[in-house]
Amino acid sequence: MTVIKAGLFRHLGSIALAALISSSLVSGDAASADDTPAKQLFGTVQLPSNSAPSPIGFYAKGCMAGAVAIPTDGPTWQAMRLSRNRRWGNPAMIELLEKFSKDAVRLGWGSGILIGDISQPRGGPMLSGHSSHQVGLDADIWFTPMPEQRLSAQAREDLPFTSMLDKSKFLTVNSKRWTPAHAKVVMRAASYPQVERVFVNPAIKKKLCDTWTGDRSLLGKVRPIYGHDEHFHIRMHCPAGTSGCKAQAPVASGDGCDKSLAWWFTKEPWAKPGKKPGEKPVKPRFATLSDLPKACAAVLAAPAASGQSATVGTAYVAPQVQPASQTGDAAIQQVINAGAGDLPDNTIPIPVSRPSLQ
């Protein structure tokens, strides 16, 4: 049974929430659910749906069925910020992270990797932070290697991020912090065929353009973006056979060390938004359930997977596949099969917060 934290929905049990969403899905009248930001619906669910793994929608506009969690501790990784409950992903992503952690050690990356946010138990918009990470195919890796001594649960909450930038200079990598090993792990992440993009700060992209002597054909997959100076972001392609997953437009040809990178070093990306005299501030509008693919309502309404919850020190094991009548598969797949027309346009750019100008 889905566990709902105290908050906006503390007056609704998980049964009531499922009934609300199921009723809306069947009747087409989703007014009750539509009044609530989708991040509140997805951000308070504690367990994944008891259904086959499936990313639904786009990276920044979707949800996830049948997620599994990476164990909090592995031989070559540790999951960070456990209180966020964001170490859930598509099984393909979890498998990739475990492989990458081993490769990182072989490249001289300490004892392994520190894994940041992947996704929430059922994906969807988050209560804070990311605009993507909604379908279980995105994962953040800290630019801090895993220390030899295992971090306690509290240390994982408190350990500060380490920026790779020289804060005294505009978009410049700190040469005392950035090492050849940093470059190797980023480029190793980009080397996997199932990886679609690796996001880094523009200064880090430029550093790689200026110094990387390995296979430069992979540099095109390393994309500059706001932030991302304390971690890098791995994004996977939609796995084969996932009809509900909306792919991102392919990366342009070339290494990306061109005018598109030079743009980041102009004033335009960092300029404050213009404001007309007397213009009233626009009240932010948060995405609601109706803004997401229709199958996401079925994902929320599906029964929770039985078994261990995502608590410190436990590994979540994917439930055995049960008949469709006992799981959320039938309802979810029915909506997916109805057509992909409600999937978001893959040309929509990933929305990001404007950088701080201080």
Image (cartoon, helix red, strand yellow):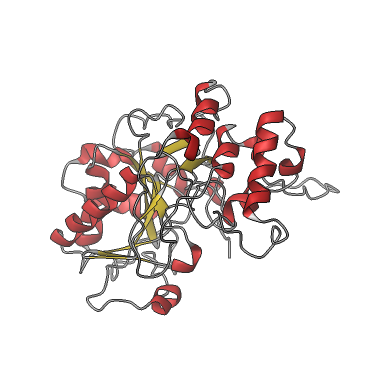
Which x, y percent locates residue 265? 45, 49
Q: Quadrant of the C terminus?
A: bottom right
Residue furthest left in the image: 106
Which x, y percent locates residue 328? 50, 38
Could you tell me if residue 201 is visible in this image?
no
Quarter-wise, where is residue 4 in the image? Answer: bottom right
From the viewer's side, name the closer residue of 129 and 1: 1
Quarter-wise, where is residue 6 in the image? Answer: bottom right
From the viewer's perspective, is residue 56 above or below residue 72?
above
Which x, y percent locates residue 266? 49, 47
From the viewer's side, name the closer residue of 74 and 299: 299
Q: Is 118 left or right of 32, judged from the image as shown?
A: left
Q: How many marks?
A: 0
Q: Is 328 left or right of 290, judged from the image as shown?
A: left
**Residue lying at 52% horizontally and 26% vertically, measured from the top left:** 334
From the viewer's perspective, is residue 164 above or below residue 194?
below
Q: Is 194 left or right of 354, judged from the image as shown?
A: left
**Residue lying at 75% horizontally and 47% vertically, measured from the top left:** 275
**Residue lying at 47% horizontally and 42% vertically, measured from the top left:** 64
From the viewer's perspective, is residue 80 above or below residue 307?
below
From the viewer's side, name the closer residue of 50 and 254: 50
Could you tell me if residue 114 is visible in this image?
yes
Q: Quadrant of the N terminus?
A: bottom right
